[in-house]
Amino acid sequence: MKDENHAFFHPSSLILLPLREGTMEWFLILFGWISAALFVIVSAYKIYRVATAPLNVRWEVYPVPHEEGERRHYGGSYMEEVDWAKKSRAGSLVAEFVEMGQEIFLLQRVRKYNVYGIWLLSLAMHWGLYLGAGLLGLLVIENALPALAPLTNVVGVVAFALGTLGAFGLIAKRATDRNLNLYTAPIDYFNLLWLAAIFVLGLASFATAGSFAAHRAYIGSVLTFQPAPIAPLVALTFFAFELFVVYMPFSKLIHYFAKYFTYHSQLWDDAFKVKGSPTDKKVAEQLAYTAAWSAPHIVPGKSWLEQAQNPNVEK
Amino acid sequence: MSEPKIIRFKDIARAGDEPLVTLTRDDLIEIPQLGDAPDVQSPQARWLERYDFSLDGFSDFDLPKPKTKEEEERLVNGFLRGLEKLFDPQSNWPFVKIFRLSLDYCVRCQTCSEACHTYIGSGRQEIYRPTYRSEVLRRIYQKYFTPSGKLLGSFVGADVEVNAKTVWRLLELSYRCNVCRRCAQVCPVGVDNALLAREIRKLFSQEMGIAPGELLKKGTRQHLKAGSSTGMTPAAFKDLVEFIEDDIFAKTGKKIKMPIDQKGADVLLIHNAGEFMAWPENPAAFAILFDAAGISWTLSSEAQGYDGVNYGAWFDDVELARVALRQISIAKELGVKKIVVGECGHAHKALCVLADRVLPGDLSLDQIPRESCLPLLWEIVKSGAVKFDPNKNDFPVTLHDSCNVVRLMGIVSPQREIVKAICKQPVREMTPNGVWNYCCGGGSGFAIMNSLNFDQWRKNVSERMKIKQVLDVFNDVLDPSINKYVIAACSNCKGAMRDGIDHYGLWDKFHITYGGLVDLMVNAMADLPQPYIEFGKQG
Ligand code: SF4
Ligand code: SF4
């Protein structure tokens, strides 16, 4: 078995030379962990950077889903009442989750407002990714619960089929629709192609064996640090995937986390400032920052508060 | 309608004065009720030598084109310096976080395109697509400021050269967006192209002092210096108030003293000062209603205290903070319980939302609440303190939603309840309406920008969709023997409606006019001897 494997190309040959028995297996085990670690570290860093960026001014857009009752549907706000600053508010976090869920699982806004026919393709690709993530989870669990294999097969095949359809469909759409192709840089095609390649490899590696047993075995070897023989196609599938996992946080493919912030810090952030509150303290801190702009109406070297207090006009 | 021209991002850097696109009537969306809409006028020949029309043949900037290499370099360097400062957490703390998110995470799905009334109104010209200017900015940023852009160039889309033409065209392009944020409402990622347009405006204003004259020099600068962006001084304001009091008496027989600088009043009412000059019947209507309802209120005669506008909301954070700080401090000095903003959309947004986090704790919203006039007006109707007779408003009425009040503050229902209570006929809702409305086309300062031939762009492109909506909503009652009324509870929107109605001849052809909500309320007051609204005399 082992010798057979080595007769094929394997990605470790790019990095670890000369090869010794089991090198590729070890490489793939380590790379599995390294890619996951890099993904977590870089993503966490990116999230940290955004989360610790200065507090922005309010810039909400209605409808805001945590508004009460009917308001959340027609886009009303607490500011529809007199003396709202004195009233308590009962918001709904559940509605935010529902809205987010509709966005994540149905791509609701794309469905409703995109006129270029990308919704189904995009939905297919996103579900390819979600189910792909589900497959990964199942492969982990299956190592302890082999009875899950039939479910894994269904989830995996559907994931790869949808992903393949979605990714190739989007490539074709972007290449042929003038409203989209002007805005599509080579890197966007590259990203889609890479994703498509992972899905196709996934399908092919399943098709050659008729099951995900080899995939499960690989995941098991990663989890236990026990090198096990791995078919080349399976190795290539995982290598392409793991490389993608490393690349992802560096690209705009992690727009899903950006979305959390754009929605919560921008579109839905409707909280007014109360004197002495943490927001007020944060604003006070930021008002001491220097507004280092150079236009004639800006006072050089002054803080934001000083700028606000000094209109810089001759009386 | 002819097929729009393909314009690539690199084209923005194209040398020469030839515009990237030249619009004619045939390019724009049709308005079926009008037959032949007016044609688009080209810029005057005498301007071409001196000013730059190289984006689309329109401009509000009466600034001479750079003539020497040094002048060009100054422009380019100023732009790049300003762009860099937009990423600085200190110099751009109010927006840096959401600016970066919008710049970095657009997935170029174009879901936002069809949300934009200027893009659609223009016959879908590429340069007016919400993403076009954002993508140009993104590509410049990548090319000049990111390692991937420097290393991989056009592979990652970093392919827009910055030269004087790029800079100028991008400046112009930032003033082809109404900052209505309808596109942000539909973006699946929450990317905000309006925010990006405003950031471009900001870098020009805050770094180089370049902004439309009406917004900076004759806008915020004049507001902070003279007391009002209209140039109205405190003394002139007091004279106008007296004139309005006389006018109220002449029209209604009511002797009303409009309170000024009343310490300890419950409410400081703050109008867009343009109302006192262009539509004095509006502040008059507020005075009539507040007087009849027994509200404890006052106006301020302090410089900035009688003008609620804040043009900084459209293009400059420093100016925004300066104006707001002054307005809110005046309320504090007067000891009022709250500020109520009259019918001015951007004043609503600036005072009630935007300025909240650029001011110190003492001026926080819980200390000096700032509220819209609309809920208070609805309270007046609900309370029964004033008797309204809906039969007096027996004509077709539609409601234009000001983006600032509705989409950006969520105040949707009070105005509708009021109209229901004071009009005989049910309100005709435009399609779309409420928070999904289309901008009037005058948003973010356009209604007052009239230098060079900018008005041609506004009338023909940005106002076009609203005019179409108005005609559609009145389609079954277009007969000019029926007077029709568009409620626009916002000075800026009223300015745009006046402009559009005049340009497309809607009064002459169809007897469609416009006005405020309070005007309509006073028109329905049971105890008034004669109609308050004089059809055909607005503006
Ligand atoms: S701004 Fe949003 S809707 Fe528009 S192209 Fe980018 S991601 Fe898509
Ligand atoms: S903010 Fe409004 S005008 Fe500007 S791009 Fe978006 S939809 Fe168009």
Image (cartoon, grey):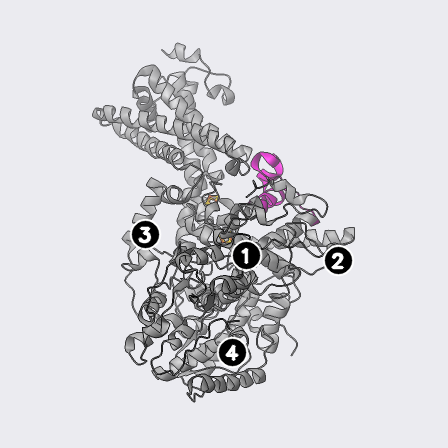
Q: What amino acid is labelled 1 in the image?
A: Arg
Q: Is residue B162 magenta?
A: yes
Residue beneath disc 4? B306
Q: Is there one chain holding both mark 4 and mark 2?
A: yes
Depth check: B277 or B539 in front?
B539
The magenta-colored residue range is B135-164
Instruction: Provide the secondary structure element on which disc 2 rests.
Output: helix
Q: Is residue B39 magenta?
A: no
- Residue A252, x across and y down, in percent: 48, 40
Instruction: Provide the secondary structure element on which disc 3 rests.
Output: helix
For the residue carrying disc 4, how many other residues have a C-alpha within 10 Å: few (<14), some (14-19), or many (20+)? many
**In this rendering, is residue B265 above or below A239?**
below
CA distance for labels 4 and 3: 40 Å
Residue beneath disc 1? B198
Depth check: A274 or B320 in front?
B320
CA distance for labels 1 and 3: 28 Å
Q: Is there one chain holding both mark 3 and mark 2?
A: no
Residue beneath disc 2? B46
- Residue A128, x across and y down, in percent: 36, 31
- Residue B19, x across and y down, in percent: 67, 47
Circle 2 or circle 1, nearest the eye? 2
* Residue drawn at (42%, 21%) of the image: A236
For the residue carrying disc 3, how many other residues have a C-alpha within 10 Å: few (<14), some (14-19), or many (20+)? some
**In this rendering, is residue B383 above or below B476?**
below
Location of the N terminus of chain B by quadrant is top right
Residue beneath disc 3? A96
